[in-house]
Image: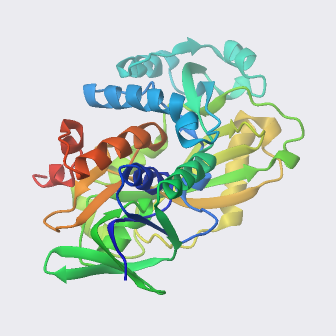
Amino acid sequence: MKTYDWIVVGGGITGAALGYELARQGLTVLLLEQHEVLQGASRYSYGGLAYWSGMTTLTRQLAAEGLAKHRSLSQELEADTQLRELNLLLTIEPDVDPQVVAQDYQKFSITPQLLDPAAAAQVEPLLNPHAISGALQLPHGHINPLLTTLAYTNAMQRHGGDIHYAQVLGLISRRDLHISGVSTAQADYHAHGVIICAGGLSRALLKTAGISVPLYFTHAESIEVSLVNTKGIKLSNIVMPAVLQRMNMEAIASTPSQDDLWEQENHELAPPIMDAGAIQFADQSLRLGQISRVLSDPHAAIDAAASEAQMRRHIGKLLPRLASLQGTWHHCLVAYCRDYLPLVGQVADYEGLHIFSGFSNPLVFVPTLAQRFSKYLTGSSDDIIKQLSPSRFDKQ
């Protein structure tokens, strides 16, 4: 049986990008993905590139590198990622002071323009100006995340990488604390190293081996409206709330005091939230959302009909013409860390086991960090990768 240099678990954009970067260095790579038709966060992402959102020297550098990478990525991967520059319109609730919100955005690398409701409605004609007290406008990038992920996967295969479609059930240990492969229902696969890139499922997968990591996830819900149902509607901006309730919910759910609950089933670690927003893709399809929940069970059942109705009510207040468009409710897991930086590096003392997951700004950071991490794994020194090691939480 073939032994690979690296097995990458998870075929979303994190796994596909890392598999590609490893394969193009001449390493033997197996990418394992459970769905032939991609599901998960890479499939249902809004596709935004928030390159303006760096607040520290580290995140500003990664955002700049990520944007530069995206600008050449279609040529590199020999496939169109549908990179576009769009304006981001961040809406402010009627009972919130726009000046206070605008001041909070001064910490980012690019500061926004504050618009009153009338000016915001001129910028975005589909917006209901009576539903907001103002809005912030920022430059924003956008890609098609599904096409970008497929482009990475195809490029990996051109460099000799393999992809198999199978659900990973557990890790294979050659001896104590040495991971030498993974098991699936179809077969066992062996490698010198295993990298977990399974997003919101990463925590549950590692748990099968008795390994706990400070990685959390939300259940994100959205409505997808296909091209045939957009009825000629043109959304000129990416529309999202300026004050994301999801951020506060995630902070509450990922405090160290909550970690024991994450190891148990059927816990709701914070109340669900609604962040009303919308994005129109280059093919004119729409994505409307979103409700976010923090449930400790990655396979928790959700009432799709009730959730869709709630999303449509909130979207109807903000973007009335979009609320009744026929679409399909979707649900996926979104991984995150409590400090909003990803986990990149060796997992505890487990030789041969690494993780590449928990990205809060994934579409900006993944391309450049996949390149950096692949070089780090083959012996190059990288101070940025060292800062993202899971061991940074050991003192907490």
Q: Quadrant of the N terminus?
A: bottom left
Please report the residue visible at 16 percent of the width from the left and 63 percent of the height from the top: 348
* Residue 295 at least partly seen: no
Q: Position of residue 327 (x, y in %)?
A: 78, 54
Q: Quadrant of residue 238?
A: top right
Q: By what rule are the colours in the image chosen?
A: rainbow
Q: Residue 384: percent from the left, percent from the top?
A: 23, 37
In the foreground, 6 or 343: 6
Residue at 60% x, 19% y is 134
Q: Is residue 246 above or below residue 321?
A: below
Q: Is residue 364 left or right of residue 234?
A: left
- Can you give x and y, in whole percent of width and height, for residue 148 in the image? 58, 46
In this orientation, which residue lies closer to the viewer: 170 or 254?
A: 170
> Which of these two is toward me, 392 or 218?
392
Q: Is residue 3 above or below residue 119?
A: below
Is 184 left or right of 158, judged from the image as shown? Answer: left
Instruction: Tell how many labels.
Output: 0
Task: Return the residue nearer the eye: 138 or 15.
Answer: 15
Is 347 situated left or right of 324 in this image?
left
State the image coordinates of residue 291 (x, y, percent, origin top left): 58, 52
- On the question of residue 369 being in view, the answer is yes
Seen at 70% across and 59% down, the residue is 329
